[in-house]
């Protein structure tokens, strides 16, 4: 597989943490994710799903093997180079929305642009407003992040992950903290952005129904790749 | 406004009571700084005014002359004949400077000096009827001498007029001789010269010895009765910066070739007392600021812990470690700036409040001789902001070192 044509490429990736007696969280994982895919990662608690997501998100570096994201090798990148890669390529959605409570919804969505180039441009604002309209928060964009409901907060977090035209969104249990209705809404929203904008989504979920609605399901067990199934 | 500033300001605003406490801590520190500096500064100023302020701060006199050789003395240099010489040092009243006008002109142009006064000094007696008192003659140029001692301020009767045959004497001498303005006094100098003067003014310098002995006359009359025509005894000066006296004295000695006396070398004990006061003041200010720094650092550390989740999220979005550091340093600057403004206002009001308290009505002095200066406010504010930045360094570094995965995983 050529890493230049893939968005994410892992070759025999392993990850261990701890000093003298390291614990192996992930071992010998090889997989490729192409641009525009909608992938779910499933597996029991403690299987290494989140570790895999953190590696793909360039938050951590593999202790074994090689990892490429958007054509760049992450294995030997400095902390600041990985931060730069995240600014340009990767958006995150977490189980808890993690919006900045002292900022408005719009300011939260503009935050990636502010981090990237200090001050948001008019285009950044237009994009943020458009994203908030699409997630149904156009009316509440000037509310403080703490003044909207949980479902709305997660939708705002999805808009924030997409801001700046990022090609890859990593979602760690994005519906885990929501009721069924709000969870379905959030998932449908991500599906919609995938379909219309061609964004690649990698979603960790415990929900088998949601996993089945993805194009591809990767199963991790005991830190290893157990299966990689394309859904039809 | 940069992102770091926007986040810092938002955190400052959102922190509510924490921010208020930090600002209050800085404000108290700045208040103490301004208050102590004003109080000690005022106290020193009063001491200086009452002592050094009414004397020449650097005095120029003639150098001691080296012993003259037998040839210079016109003696014969015969073999087997030995001469023994002894150096007689000039006392202040005996030293004399010739060709003094160019020296005064040179000193007039010296930027370190704010007043220059040639003076002729000599001993003698003042007599009125059967009463005779020993006096020290001061031959002065009134406008110049006033720059050194501010005699006009001390006049209690008459005026500072030494023209013609007029003199100005102290209250004690006037009382001892039983004279008032318009009365005549006969003088006899140590050089056995007599002259009669009319009292034109009586002063009170606040020092009995000065009031008892000083007898001010014109420079020309003093030169005449002291056999110093064409000479002066000394050049008195007042400095722009009083504590630069030693440096200025050395520089004037080198440039004029005269002997110089600095008030700092003549009053070592007073200087040491003033320095001790300044040292105590600096210590109080330093310890106050140190306690402020610890207070702010501890609150900022708590703030970092509270904000760690947000910092982790911002880091996951690609915020640079340097930016995280700046957010907390800027928070320190905001706390320092707001606290400085508040502390400066409170400190200033406190000083002006103290100045309203009734003091010594006879002398017109205040109960607390505080002297507020804008420079104290600037010093206190700058120190506070620097202290706050320093206090923010450790928490800021801690924030920048946070691992986003830990924060995301464990919240």
Image (tube, grey):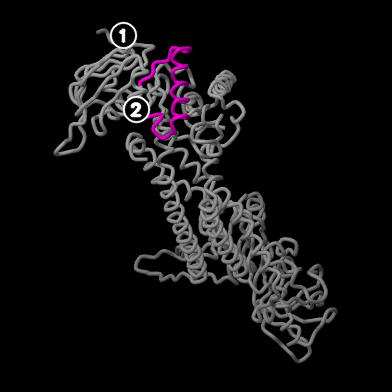
Labels 2, 1: front one: 2
Question: Is A195 situated left or right of B46 in this image?
Answer: left
**Badge 1: residue crowd in 10 Å (few <14, some 14–19, many ≥20):** some
Q: Residue at x 85, y 79 (%)?
A: B182
The picture quadrant where one finds residue B308 is top left
Quadrant position of the N terminus of chain B in the picture: top right
Q: Chain of mark 2?
A: A
Picture quadrant of residue B98: bottom right
* Chain designation of label 1: A
Whether residue B55 is visible to the viewer of this picture, yes or no, is no
* Front-lying residue, B73 or B408: B408
Of residue B366 and residue B354, the one placed in the foreground of this image is: B354
Most extreme residue toward the left is: A21
Q: Position of residue A42 (x, y in %)?
A: 29, 25
State the quadrant of the C terminus of chain B: top left
Q: How far across and down, in percent of the image, does residue B272 sit? A: 48, 68
Pointers 2 and 1 within a single chain: yes
Residue position marked by numbered label 1 in the rendering: A4
In this view, which residue lies farthest toward the bottom? B130
Give the farthest residue toward the right: B182
In-front residue for pair B255/B290? B290
Q: Which residue is mark 2?
A: A207
Q: Main secondary structure of the magenta part?
A: helix
Q: CA distance from mark 2 to mark 1?
A: 32 Å
Instruction: State which region is magenta.
Output: A173-202
Determine whether, in the image, residue B62 is placed left or right of residue A87.
Answer: right
From the top left corner, tell me how far across and down residue A120 is, in percent: 55, 24
Badge 2 marks a residue whose secondary structure is loop
């Amino acid at each position: 597989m050529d890493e230049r044509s893939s968005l994410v490429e892992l070759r025999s990736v392993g990850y261990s943490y701890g000093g003298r007696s390291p614990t192996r969280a992930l071992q010998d994982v090889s997989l490729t994710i192409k641009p525009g895919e909608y992938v779910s990662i499933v597996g029991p608690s403690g299987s290494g799903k989140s570790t895999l997501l953190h590696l793909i998100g360039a938050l951590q570096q593999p202790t074994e093997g090689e990892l490429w994201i958007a054509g760049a090798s992450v294995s030997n990148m400095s902390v600041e180079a990985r931060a730069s890669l995240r600014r340009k390529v990767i958006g995150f959605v977490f189980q808890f929305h993690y919006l900045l409570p002292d900022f408005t919804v719009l300011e939260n969505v503009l935050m990636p642009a502010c981090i990237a180039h200090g001050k948001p441009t008019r285009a950044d604002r237009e994009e943020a407003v458009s994203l908030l309209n699409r997630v149904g928060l156009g009316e509440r964009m000037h509310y403080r992040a703490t003044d909207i409901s949980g479902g709305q907060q997660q939708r705002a977090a999805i808009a924030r992950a997409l801001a700046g035209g990022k090609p890859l969104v990593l979602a760690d249990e994005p519906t885990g903290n929501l009721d069924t209705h709000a969870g379905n809404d959030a998932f449908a929203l991500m599906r919609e952005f995938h379909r219309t904008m061609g964004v690649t989504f990698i979603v960790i979920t415990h929900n088998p129904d949601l996993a089945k609605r993805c194009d591809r399901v990767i199963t991790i067990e005991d830190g290893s790749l157990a299966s990689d199934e394309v859904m039809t | 406004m940069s992102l770091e500033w926007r986040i810092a300001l938002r955190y400052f605003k959102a922190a509510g009571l924490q921010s208020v406490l930090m600002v209050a801590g800085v404000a108290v520190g700045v208040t103490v700084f301004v208050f102590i500096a004003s109080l000690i500064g005022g106290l020193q100023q009063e001491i200086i005014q009452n002592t050094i302020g009414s004397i020449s701060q650097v005095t120029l006199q003639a150098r001691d002359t080296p012993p003259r050789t037998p040839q210079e003395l016109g003696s014969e240099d015969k073999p087997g004949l030995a001469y023994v010489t002894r150096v007689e040092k000039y006392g202040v009243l005996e030293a004399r400077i010739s060709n003094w006008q160019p020296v005064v002109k040179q000193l007039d142009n010296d930027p370190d000096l704010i007043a220059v006064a040639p003076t002729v000094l000599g001993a003698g007696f003042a007599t009125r009827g059967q009463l005779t008192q020993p006096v020290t003659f001061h031959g002065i140029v009134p406008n110049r001498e006033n720059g050194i001692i501010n005699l006009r301020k001390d006049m209690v009767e008459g005026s500072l007029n030494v023209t013609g045959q007029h003199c100005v004497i102290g209250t004690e001498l006037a009382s001892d001789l039983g004279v008032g303005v318009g009365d005549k006094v006969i003088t006899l100098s140590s050089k056995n010269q007599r002259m009669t003067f009319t009292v034109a003014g009586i002063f009170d310098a606040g020092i009995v010895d000065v009031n008892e002995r000083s007898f001010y006359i014109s420079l020309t009359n003093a030169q005449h009765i002291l056999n110093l025509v064409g000479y002066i005894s000394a050049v008195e000066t007042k400095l722009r910066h009083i504590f630069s006296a030693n440096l200025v004295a050395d520089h004037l000695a080198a440039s004029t070739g005269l002997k110089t006396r600095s008030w700092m070398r003549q009053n070592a004990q007073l200087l040491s007392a003033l320095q001790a006061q300044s040292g105590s003041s600096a210590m109080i200010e330093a310890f106050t600021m140190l306690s402020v720094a610890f207070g702010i650092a501890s609150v900022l550390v708590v703030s970092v812990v509270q904000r760690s989740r947000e910092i982790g999220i911002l880091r996951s979005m690609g915020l640079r470690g340097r930016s995280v550091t700046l957010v907390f340093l800027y928070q320190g600057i905001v706390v320092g700036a707001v606290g400085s403004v508040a502390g400066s206002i409170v400190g200033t009001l406190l000083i002006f409040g103290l100045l309203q308290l009734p003091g010594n009505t006879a002398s017109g002095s205040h109960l607390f001789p505080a002297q507020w200066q804008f420079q104290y406010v600037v010093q206190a504010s700058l120190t506070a902001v620097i202290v706050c930045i320093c206090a923010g360094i450790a928490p800021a570094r801690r924030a920048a070192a946070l691992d986003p995965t830990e924060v995301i995983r464990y919240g």
